[in-house]
Amino acid sequence: MGDEVKVFGHWRSPFGRSVEAVLKMKGVPYEYFEEDLSIKSPLLLKYNPIYKRVPVLVHNEKPIGESLVILQYIDETWKDNPILPQDPYEKAMCLFWAKFIHEKCMHALWNACWGLEDKEKAIEESLDHLKTLENELKDKRFFGGDKIGFVDIVANFIGFWLRALQEVVGLELLTQEKFPNLFKWSDEFVNCDIIKENLPPRDKLTGYYQAHLASSSASK
Ligand SMILES: N[C@@H](CCC(=O)N[C@@H](CS)C(=O)NCC(=O)O)C(=O)O
């Protein structure tokens, strides 16, 4: 019997898109279920009762939540085109940077763009974190070296979503002048075929952000 693979996602979720990108890189066919995050489906609640979030991967009826866990599972289950190194230390370092991107960078960048908490502090933190990534990337083409790896996939928000979002909210966080390595990386990243064909339409995304910005300004 073949593998049955399902992905529950949402069109503008970078986490969900990262899972889809890796399945595509590995040539794993899957069925996609678009979730309405305002009315979560009974299936999503069944498969991810703890976090109730997308993405969820369901492999032969076994559900897995949290994109970092899912990406590792995919890499260990389907061995073609590995995204994590074999060496335990190198692998640990990839997981370290992935956690840094999810927990530190994305949190600060999101707060800076939407001004949810202390906006000025979030902008300062975002610039610090981007500097850290700039120094980690150095002159490598990708975080994974010559080819896209785990950290690149996890950093997809910085590669694509951030540039659209900062334009809508009028911030200059990731710019060529401030972070030339990271800026070049983001251009290369979004232009890789599998990544490119797996991104949300930019107009739709900026349209959503513009509407969200207008409604949050109106309610202030
Ligand atoms: N740490 C999670 C984050 C997932 C996440 O935040 N998903 C969002 C969509 S981008 C979601 O499901 N939001 C609905 C909610 O939190 O109720 C991961 O890496 O999978």
Image: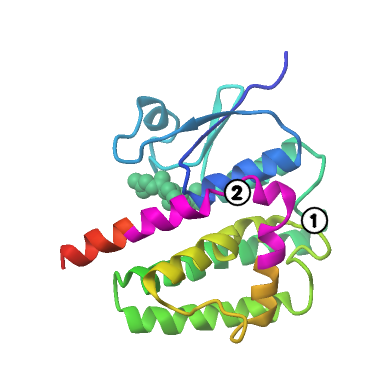
Q: 61 left or right of 51?
A: right
Instruction: Give the color scheme: rainbow, by chain, secondary structure or one colour.
Output: rainbow
In this figure, which residue is indicated by the disc labeled 1?
Answer: 85
Q: Is residue 207 visible?
A: yes
Q: 203 left or right of 24?
A: left
Residue 209: which numbered mark, if any?
none
Q: Residue furthest top?
A: 1
Secondary structure category for the residue under label 2: helix
Residue 18: which numbered mark, if any?
2
Q: 31 left or right of 185?
A: left
Other-residue count near label 2 (Cα within 10 Å), few / some / many at <14 / 14–19 / ≥20? many
User: Residue placed at 78% from the left, 78% from the top?
Assistant: 139
Q: Amino acid at mark 2?
A: Ser
Give how far across and how far down residue 188 sits, in percent: 72, 64
Q: Is residue 93 visible?
A: no
User: Residue placed at 45% from the left, 50% from the top?
Assistant: 204
**Residue 202 in the image: above or below residue 177:** above
In magenta, the rendered stretch is: 187-210
Q: Earlier in the sequence, mark 2 or mark 1?
A: 2
Where is residue 114, by image quadrant? bottom left
**Residue 122 in the image: above or below residue 36:** below
